[in-house]
Amino acid sequence: MGTDEFGIRPGEEMAALPARFDAGLYFIGRLRTPWLARQDCPKNGLQSDAVCTVEVDAAYAPGLRSITGCTHLILLYWMDRATRGLIVQQPRHADGPRGTFSLRSPARPNPIALSVVELIAREGDLLRVRGLDCLDGTPLLDIKPYYATTDSRPEAQVDRAGAEP
């Protein structure tokens, strides 16, 4: 399980996680970024122009065939150092607690994160991308093409005031 180097804030709640997992995963590689500490990471991938590296394990490298036909990718990754089980959080930017599922925080029962990244180049089993927001060495779960025609939702909104109790 992940750790929380910053502790649980007042007003936050943890869920009692089951003793056993429901599913298994295979990490297909690692993400290489300039960030070694949580406080150094950008809050989202648009806050940095850093070029990062996606290292795909050799066994999965054939899955990169034709990937250079994509300008953008969706990367799914496992925030392995995040707190597990946090279901109510007190974000620093909010005036009150919020439910975990209304946030993009890495602290959650299943610390799965995603970023839409720009594919800059492929170099064998490595991809150079821009738009990541995770710690160096973060395990990679999956790579999917980003389709603006089906993935973009320009009308989407998030009520930052968090009107629900």
Image (spheres, helix red, strand yellow):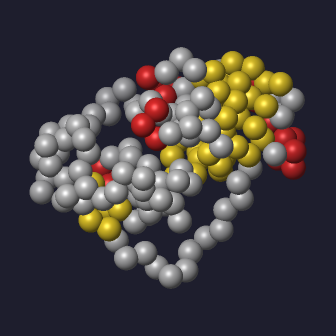
Given residues 77 and 72, the one toward you in this image is: 77
User: x and y percent of residue 94 in the render?
Assistant: 19, 41
Q: Residue at x 50, y 82 (%)?
A: 19
Residue 129 in the figure: left or right of residue 60:
left
Residue 70 in the figure: left or right of residue 74:
right
Given residues 67 and 139, the one toward you in this image is: 139
User: x and y percent of residue 119 in the render?
Assistant: 67, 23
Q: Residue at x 23, y 37 (%)?
A: 93
- Occupied quadrant, residue 36: top right
The vertical placement of 90 against 134, above or below, is below
Q: Residue at x 44, y 63 (%)?
A: 84
Residue 94 in the figure: left or right of residue 122:
left
The answer to whether residue 103 shows anywhere in this view is yes
Q: Residue at x 71, y 34 (%)?
A: 54
- Occupied quadrant, residue 100: bottom left
Residue 86 in the figure: left or right of residue 110:
left
